[in-house]
Image (cartoon, rainbow, N blue to C red):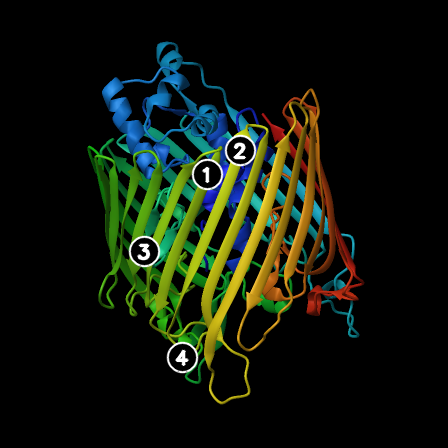
Amino acid sequence: MKSLTLFSFFLTTFLTGLQGQSTEQIQQLAAEIFENSTAASEQEPDFSSLTDNLIQLYQSPININQARREDLEKIFFLSDSQIEALLYQRYQLKNFYSIYEMQSIEGFSRQTLEWLEPLITFGISEQLAPGRFRAKGDLFVRAQTLLETRAGYRQREDGSKPYQGSKIKLYTRLEVQPVKDLKMGFIAEKDQGEPMFNHQIGTGSSGGLLILATGQGSQTNHCGSVQNERRSGPGSADRYGAHQKQCYHIHPQPPGLLPSFLSASEYGGLSGVLMDFGTRDLSITPFISIKKVDGRLDTLDNGSTIITSLKNDGYHRTLTELSQRKNVREAVYGLQAKYHLNRFMIETGYLHYHLANPVLPPSEVYNRNYFSGKRHQNFWVAGEGSLYNLHLFGELAFNPNGAPAVWGGILLPVKSVVDLSLGYRRIPMDYRAPLGAPLTEASVPAGESGLYIGWQMDLPASLTLSAYLDYYRHNWLQYQTSAPANGHDFLCVLSHQSYKEWENTLRYRYRNKTINLTTSDRGKPVGKRTQNQWRLQSRYHTAANWIFTLRADLQTVNRPDRPNLPKGFYLGQDIRYVSDNKKWNITTRYALFDAEEYDTRVYAYEPDVLYSFSTPAYYGRGSRWLIVGKWTILPKLDLWARYAQWQYSNRENISTGHALIEGNRSREIKFQVRKRF
């Protein structure tokens, strides 16, 4: 799976104007950061963690005079060098009293301070006169459906239907904080086509979360089913640009390292108990999780049951999919310890993974590096720290199979002019981490090595240049690549903002990757596929109510076996209006696209209701129109409505199989209610 954070340094395009914005605009920021990462992912990313994090920061700002490095790392647009400069400046001054005093921090631009201001407090008034805590809660209820009927809902000749449920998708989410140190939550979702509350299935997916923070001895306790934003897996890199945090975790990340959040995702996450013991400088976090997961099972000739693969799409619509629901028992337990010493942090941990049945992947040669068996163990040692303005970080991750996986790097600001980041990774062929969600080039990164270089620099005329180059090499076969191979990924962004109301961005990306070629020759020869992607975006904010965003994309693909492939085009216009009293707003988009080649499809984040994300592929030829509105009916009572339509000019039908829609038009409606109390 390609890194879901590969494009996160484009957030500079979207962060301006965060102060005073509503939570749905914060959600837009969260999703736009990741919109293009969907192109390289096998499934729709779950942005809930980033949205939760931003909304919590917006609603409960960080006390900048008491924050530790872990707290500041939640503000993801701060680089490690900026965080280190802030901590050092605070060490010298003891306290900050206003945002103006922070102008002297090395590497903090005016724009950074504008983004930062709504997310922090200075804690002075709170220390003198602590306020009284008031219980609070948040309830969401959502329903959506297609107006057209897919083939899976139609009766067959024998009277049966492929999909066992209705075409309505339902979602509910409840979070309650009855007292200051206790948070509780519940979430449930039924996907389109899934049955609900019958003899086959209770509900599509559900989960709960309880967090108790005592502040003494056991600092925090987590109990229930939670989803974690895990930067995990062998060689999983949060590949930010030079001005972003360079986080890299090659071990399976335990749930305590990053904050838990509610998610309707049925793949990943843990269900159990986590406890965080320790002091401000030393924390020890044991955890245990026991739950059922989806799997594709098979029976061998000797009668034993094996798992051919774990199922991660979350669909339970057909009888086959229902038979694969929660049929494998998974147990995870382990321990993590972290120690802070001045400007350095050391972390170590152990994780044990166990399945009720052994995994035995299909016999294809490229599956050699996949996890197999019932049990696995991982152990890791990691550290990071700063010397002057140089930030160092690294990890060693071990498993019983052999040599450790290695990651290391540095971040170096050069006279507040250029920020540089360097990283090196090497994952041995026999390294495994079953819980890993690898964010390297390959979905199974065993045998991958690579070198990453990222930089950002401010130019004259209000210009900013950000870029990275990632070179990688695979020492074994990969899916659709029948030979050891190498490649590289280059991305460059030029941003211009002469004044706050108008932003312009030009982006270019070049990818060179080895793939199998389509040929009649014997064997499976490989060759280089190159992709060129250009994007121009301009966003204008009027003084009061209007925001206009124009975006144009051009993508080309070249490969030896298919010369002269058609180009991909996208042209979209967004218009947003917010009423004077802020009680209602409306956003609309109209887009034209022509991307008949699958490799030139364009991904674009779409306006949606809060906690619902839409980053579809604009693939084929046609138009896209949508409109979404929000109305605050009463104080703390919000209503959303959304209508979206695809219209294709080169198709008589949309999709295939059970998802087939007869005709060239697809329409969807969605409603959501939110009650805060």
What residue did someone put label 3 on? 250
Mark 3 lies on a secondary structure that is loop
What residue did someone put label 1 on? 464
Q: Is residue 528 above or below residue 496?
A: below
| Cβ–Cβ under 8 Å for marks 2 and 4 | no
- Tell me how far mark 1 sits from mark 2, CA to CA: 9 Å
Q: Nearer the viewer, residue 3 or 610?
A: 3
What residue did someone put label 4 on? 365
Callout 2, which amino acid?
Answer: Gln
| Cβ–Cβ under 8 Å for marks 1 and 2 | yes
Callout 3, which amino acid?
Answer: Ile
Quadrant that contains the C terminus = top right
Quarter of the image for residue 386 reads top left
Q: Which mark is residue 426?
A: none
User: Callout 4: few (<14), some (14-19), or many (20+) C-alpha neighbours within 10 Å?
Assistant: few
Q: Position of residue 297 (x, y in %)?
A: 49, 72
User: Callout 1: few (<14), some (14-19), or many (20+) C-alpha neighbours within 10 Å?
Assistant: some
Q: Is residue 165 above or below residue 429?
A: above
Left or right side of 391 for 418: right
Residue 76 in sight from this viewpoint: no
Q: Position of residue 400 (x, y in %)?
A: 24, 65
Mark 2 lies on a secondary structure that is strand
Task: Give the mark toward the camera: 3 or 1.
Answer: 1
What residue did someone put label 2 on? 497
Callout 4, which amino acid?
Answer: Val
| Cβ–Cβ under 8 Å for marks 3 and 1 | no
| Cβ–Cβ under 8 Å for marks 3 and 2 | no
Q: Earlier in the sequence, mark 3 or mark 1?
A: 3
Q: Residue at x 29, y 56 (%)?
A: 424
